[in-house]
Image: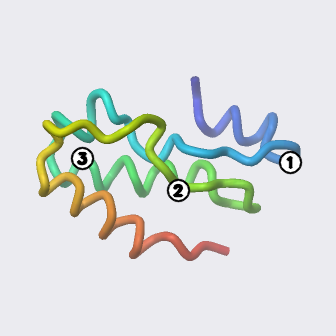
Amino acid sequence: MDPCEIKSRFGANLTFWGAGIDTQKTLPFGTPDEVRAEVIARIKDFAPGGGFVFASVHNIQPMVPVENLLALYETFNEHRNYA
């Protein structure tokens, strides 16, 4: 699904919970830079106008590199305030 299309079609009526990072591909197998890029993209897609709770969709699995978890949390912390 296209995040921008979903937000534009349903964003006035729904709060999006999750979708902050792909926990099956990007988080466990991507680089820290790929994690950062995806976190920023999801915030830009879902946050404008409110109605977005940043979270992973599923549990974070034990094989996720610590560097990727740090990239996730640090990037969210840097970009979580939006207008």
Compared to residue 62, the image places residue 66 above or below, namely below
Q: Quadrant of the N terminus?
A: top right
Q: Earlier in the sequence, mark 3 or mark 2?
A: 3
Q: CA distance from mark 3 to mark 2?
A: 14 Å
Front-most of 60 and 39?
Answer: 60
Residue 52 screen position, x and y as percent: 65, 54
Q: Residue furthest top?
A: 1
Residue 30 screen position, x and y as percent: 18, 39
Q: Mark number for residue 63?
A: none
Helix, strand or loop under label 3: helix
Q: Which residue is mark 1?
A: 12
* Mark 2 in CB contact with mark 1 (< 8 angstroms): no
> Residue type at mark 2?
Ile
* Mark 3 in CB contact with mark 2 (< 8 angstroms): no
Residue displayed at 76% across by 61% down: 49
Helix, strand or loop under label 1: loop
Q: Earlier in the sequence, mark 2 or mark 1?
A: 1
Q: Dot 2, crowdedness within 10 Å: few (<14), some or many (≥20)?
A: many
Residue 69 screen position, x and y as percent: 23, 55
* Mark 3 in CB contact with mark 1 (< 8 angstroms): no
Q: Residue 16 sits in which quadrant?
A: top right
Q: CA distance from mark 2 to mark 1?
A: 16 Å
> Residue type at mark 1?
Ala
Front-most of 13 and 65?
Answer: 65
Q: Which residue is mark 3?
A: 34
Q: Earlier in the sequence, mark 3 or mark 1?
A: 1
Q: Mark number for residue 43?
A: 2
Q: Is residue 73 left or right of residue 41?
A: left
Q: Is residue 26 left or right of residue 22?
A: left
